[in-house]
């Protein structure tokens, strides 16, 4: 499938998902055009709405990249949510343990600590996948729940702030807080950081031997093996990169928005990253646009509910439809026909061989 065909199919799938969402809004007794108008105008053309969109898009973008890189190597990383939690935990522990560093040194080290945490959490399913053949979808998915409970234990016990009425840690030092991008808002530079990571990963995949090897393993494992590419190490490398990206998304939430580690501090950004990756057709350079689109849907859902009365859960339905329809759109006719015709051809060949052997007997 060429790039134009892929983009056309994704656009059609997106329009179809929005159309089905419009039908649901209509069945609920509201005007879908008015609802979508409020949704998109408030999310992208209103100062405060766009600020909220950027805040949500920052972790979504990194979580999307955390899905894209492993999937380019043929590995499904469904554990972005857990990696965000562990990354946030590592970043917060470092920030609270060493609070007196200057910001220019402390902030990069917090990101490094968070990346190590996310990579550590991704290394477990990566090893099981590469050396034990364990299904990485099941392992990464289940590890999300373990990570959430680990963070809940940490903020309710060892990291609990003194006199806190709710499970959360002490605030990180002001020197460690990310700079504000839009005045008088919560919009920090996290999205700019995500854009920088997007450009780096795009050029790494496109112009470096290790990036090409990772892509080759995902596209054709047999050709990669014939070329001498170590597939196990490639799988582990892809998962470690994905985990570190998700871990840094956790750090952004801690030092960019909440300034402390909370119980359930992620709003499901790890799962949103899967939608971002699918909608971008696994292309890192497109991921910022899809992250902004999904963040805009999420940021505008509440406004749409208040202004028009449409339940915001309609947007959850639209996001789910986007995943299903885009995934269906990326299946090529060649793939479908091959999957159907190949077994038929094999059966026909076996039948002819059996008949020939019977005649010879």
Image (spheres, rainbow, N blue to C red):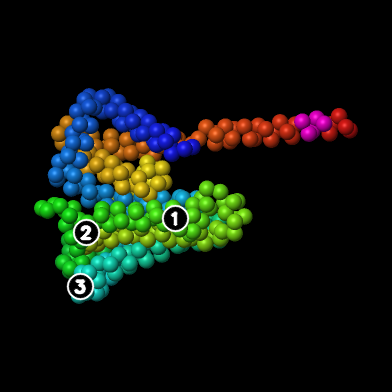
State the separation of the CA atoms marked 1 and 3: 36 Å
In the image, residue 281 above or below residue 84: above
As helix, strand or loop, the secondary structure at mark 2 comes to helix
Q: Can residue 4 be seen here?
A: yes
Q: Is residue 234 magenta?
A: no
Classify residue 306 as left or right of residue 269: left
In the image, residue 332 above or below residue 212: above
In the image, residue 345 above or below residue 274: above
Pointer 1 or 3: first along the chain? 3
Where is residue 230 drawn, in percent x and y? Answer: 56, 60
Where is residue 193 drawn, in percent x and y? Answer: 28, 57
Q: Which residue lies furthest to the right in this view?
A: 361
Query: What residue is drawn where x is 32% and y is 60%?
Result: 248
Q: Quadrant of residue 100?
A: bottom left
Which span of residues is magenta-colored? 352-356
Tag shown at residue 256: 2
Query: What residue is drawn where x is 50% and y is 35%?
Result: 332
Q: Which of 147 and 330 is in front in this view?
A: 330
Query: What residue is drawn where x is 41% and y is 64%?
Result: 120
Residue tagged by mark 3? 102
- Camera-near label (1 vs 3) is 1
The residue carrying pointer 2 sits among few (fewer than 14), some (14 to 19) or many (20 or more) residues within 10 Å by Cα, namely many
Q: Nearer the viewer, residue 287 or 113?
A: 287
């Amino acid at each position: 499938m060429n790039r134009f065909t892929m983009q056309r199919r994704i656009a059609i799938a997106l329009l179809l998902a929005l159309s089905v969402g419009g039908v649901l809004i209509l069945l609920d007794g509201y005007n879908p055009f008015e609802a979508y108008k409020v949704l998109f105008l408030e999310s992208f053309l209103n100062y405060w709405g766009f600020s909220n969109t950027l805040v949500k898009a920052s972790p979504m973008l990194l979580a999307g990249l955390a899905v894209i890189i492993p999937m380019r190597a043929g590995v499904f990383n469904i554990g972005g949510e857990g990696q965000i939690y562990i990354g946030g935990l590592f970043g917060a522990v470092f920030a609270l343990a060493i609070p007196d560093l200057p910001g220019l040194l402390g902030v990069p080290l917090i990101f490094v600590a968070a990346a190590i945490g996310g990579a550590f959490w991704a290394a477990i399913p990566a090893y099981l996948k590469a050396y034990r053949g364990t299904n990485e979808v099941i392992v990464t998915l289940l590890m999300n729940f373990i990570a959430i409970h680990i963070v809940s234990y940490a903020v309710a016990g060892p990291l609990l702030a003194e006199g806190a009425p709710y499970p959360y840690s002490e605030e990180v030092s002001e020197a460690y807080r990310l700079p504000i991008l839009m005045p008088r808002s919560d919009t920090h530079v996290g999205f700019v950081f995500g854009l920088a990571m997007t450009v780096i990963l795009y050029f790494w995949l496109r112009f470096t031997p290790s990036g090409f090897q990772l892509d080759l393993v995902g596209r054709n494992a047999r050709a990669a093996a014939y070329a001498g590419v170590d597939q196990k190490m490639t799988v582990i490398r892809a998962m470690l990169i994905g985990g570190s990206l998700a871990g840094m998304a956790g750090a952004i939430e801690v030092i960019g928005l909440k300034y402390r580690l909370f119980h359930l501090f992620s709003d499901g950004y790890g799962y949103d990253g899967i939608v971002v990756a699918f909608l971008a057709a696994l292309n890192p350079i497109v991921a910022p646009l899809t992250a902004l689109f999904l963040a805009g849907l999420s940021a505008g859902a509440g406004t749409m509910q208040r202004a028009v009365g449409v339940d915001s859960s309609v947007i959850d339905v639209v996001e789910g439809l986007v995943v299903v329809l885009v995934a269906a759109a990326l299946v090529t006719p060649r793939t479908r026909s091959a999957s159907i015709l190949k077994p038929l051809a094999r059966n026909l060949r076996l039948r002819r061989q059996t008949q020939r052997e019977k005649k010879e007997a």
